[in-house]
Each structure stands twice: as structure tokens, then as C-alpha cells.
Image (cartoon, helix red, strand yellow):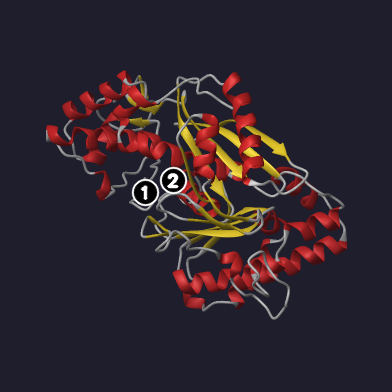
Amino acid sequence: MLVGQLGQRREGVQVTNPARRGNNLDSVRMHNLSTVLTIAHHVGPVSRSDVTRETGLNRSTIGALVGELVELGLVTESGPNANLRVGRPSPVISPNPRVAALAVNPEIDAVTVGLVGLDGRVQQRRRVALDRVPSPEEAVAAAAGAIAGLVETASVDHLVGIGVAVPGLVRQSDGLVRRAPHLGWVDVPFARLLADAVGLPASAANDAQLGAYAEHVFGAGVGVGELIYVNGGSSGIGGGVILGGAAFTGAAGHAGELGHVRVGASEALDSGGLAGTLEAEVSRARLLALLGLESIDADGLAAAILGSDDPRLRDEVHRQLELLGVALGTALTLFNPRLIVLGGFLATLYQADAAVLDRAVARATLPETLEGVQITRTRLGSDILLVGAAELAFEPLLADPASIAAGASAAPPVG
């Protein structure tokens, strides 16, 4: 699950990925269809000549494959792109945004649902605010209700399935939520429960790991082989790691839990019962308390923090940035990434005073390890977890594009 070579977008520059090399043998036509569709999904719009060069297949084979994908309704083709390339103009291939996936992100104060097109863009989203931490059944009910509303108004040809971004430990082999401490869930088959309720296949994975994947394929990490994504939300802090262009999830899928790394001598406990950790000390709840707020979405919290001139809030932002710097220094020492991407309220903290975090990170790692490292906010913004979750649902389609003819639905039963 999301552990193979990941796709890379190109902006006028050829990027060859060995995993994309095609094969002219008829016996691997499915592989070649998968290769072309994955390029269109990750890169599109993309010229047919670029796909030919990227895959190593001949022009006539690419023409036949693209024609089949057009017939399946997965891509569209348009006239040559107005660009600076010399030579015969080439048709442009685009993923069909009317082929879509549903994405679900349950947290302690809300369940967010999105409709994401095959072009990787969030078309609609609904946030169901909750007045208490939901049980798995309550979260399923909230998600199913929001999905019903989205499906009713959606303009889609096919819904391929549901991906779930869970703030907790998720077993890679079957998507079982082993433990989501903030939600109080232990060994919950949430994806199966949601699939039964909605009538579409569903898969689940850790939210920050999905965020790392999304940022690598569609965001600030495009073309970067080593990156760390750190997400801060109402359900705590998590991390995802890309190494060698592939998602690093660990033996059971639990790698990257940066929120449980100890950053100080405090005896404050995090959601997993560990003392002095990043999650125990760097907290969205503390920021909300200083702002006099109880529950708000990520964009609203960002506006509130950046618009405040309260010195108490400024001091708390600086304190949290200092401790975040300790954790990021540890991550740099362990993984030596080229890029660190911050999401959720952590991105807002960095936007509030980037210099404080930059200095804290520099103090927490070796100067040689820090060379060439960039720290940035997510380019995908508040959509990142929905985009990442949708990739779970798109994964079977990308592996076997012809399956859409039999397995997709434009109006799934809900409820």
C-alpha cells in the first residue's frame, strides 16, 4: 500500500522513473495501461510525446493505450499544447476529473469528507462538526451522511471507492485501526464498517503517511526523493516519510510517529501515555484556549492565529516552535531528508514566525545534516489529507484501469 516507486510531475523537464518503463509485449498490456494512466494522474495534463519518452514505448503503442483509456473514460485528449518545444505538436492527455474518489478524515471534533477527482483536485468537501469524540459507529454515520450529500450533488461518471485518513496507527496489511489514541479506538475495522454503510470499497491508512504521499506526488515534494511531512491536527501530531522516492511505512505501517518523540523533561503525557513528547507539548488545544475558541477548522484557526496580536499567544507560538525544532532536528539526524513539509496548525506556527523554528532546528542537528534542507508549508493546504486519502481509493484503478468497466458506480447506495 503506497510503498512502491511514486510518480513525479514534470514542468517541461523529463524525469525518468524506472518503475514507469513500459513493455511492448501484449501479455503486459495491463501493466502498460497502468503505467500510462499513472503518469496522466500524477503529471497531467501531459503531452503524448512526453509519455512516449517517459515509458520507452513506441508512438503507435502509446496511441493505442491512450485510445483505450479514452474509451474507458479515464482520460481525455485535446489538441497540441502551446509550448516552446521544437518539432511536431503532440496531443495532450488529461485525467478525467469526472472519475472520482471519496476521502474521509475522522478526528476528535469533526468528520471531514471530500470528493477528489482523478486529476488530484478536491471538488467538494463537507465538515461535520461533532460535540464529542465519536465512536467508530458515530464516525461512520457522520461520514455516510456527508457522503450522501456529496453524491447527490456531484457531477461524476464513476466513483471508484473511499480512502480514509486516520489519526492513529493503522495496520498496513488490512487497514485495521490498531490504535487511534485521541479517538479512543483500538482494533477497529473502520474501513470495513464504512464500506458496509456506503456500499463502496474502502481502505484506510495513517493520515500523516497519506499526507506525505500526497505532498510528494502533487505538492511541494514533487521530484524530491527524501522528505518528511509532519501534520498537526485536532487529533495530535503525526509524521510521514518518503525515502528514495518511496513511502517508508515500517514493518507494520507504523513508521513516522514523530508526535511521540520526547522533546523535553516535562511530565505532561501525550495521547499514548508517553511523557514530554512533541504531541504533549505542541498542542492545537493550547492555541484554541488562548484564542477563546472551542472548535474551528484548519483555515479558520490559521486566520485567528495570524490575525492576533495577543502577546500570550505569541509567546506560546514561540514555545511550541522551539519544541517542534527539537523534534525536527531528531528527524533530520535519523533520515537526512532534503525537504520538511509542515501541515495543519504546524504550518500556521511556521508562517507566524519561521525564523524561530529555523534557529531551533539548527541548534538540534549537525550543520552538515542541515545543508541543503528546506522547511516549507504544505502546498496542498487543508486539502492534503483528503488528496492523500483519495489515493488509497485510486490505487486499485491505477493498477488495473480496465477494472473500471465492471467495478465502478456513479450512484452508490448510501446508508
- Percent across and percent down for residue 384 are 56, 44
Type of amino acid under label 2 = Val
Q: Which residue is mark 2?
A: 217
Q: In percent of the image, x 37 and y 30: which residue is there?
A: 83
Tell me if residue 214 comes above or below residue 25 in the rendering: below
**Residue that protrudes farthest toward the bottom in the picture:** 265
Residue 89 visible within the image:
no
Which quadrant, please, contains the C terminus? top right
Residue 350 visible within the image:
yes
How many numbered dots are placed on residues in this image?
2
- Percent across and percent down for residue 38 are 34, 37
Type of amino acid under label 1 = Leu
Asked if disc 1 and disc 2 are in contact, CB closer than 8 Å, the reply is yes
Comparing 400 with 308, the one in front is 400
Q: In percent of the image, x 72 and y 78: which residue is there?
A: 266
Q: Quadrant of residue 151?
A: top right
Tell me if residue 276 comes above or below residue 406 in the rendering: below
State left or right for residue 135 relative to residue 104: right
State left or right for residue 127 relative to residue 213: right
Name the secondary structure under disc 1: loop
The disc label shown at residue 6, or none: 1
Q: In percent of the image, x 66 and y 36: which residue is there?
A: 142
Marks 1 and 2, how far apart at CA = 7 Å
- Percent across and percent down for residue 251 are 39, 63
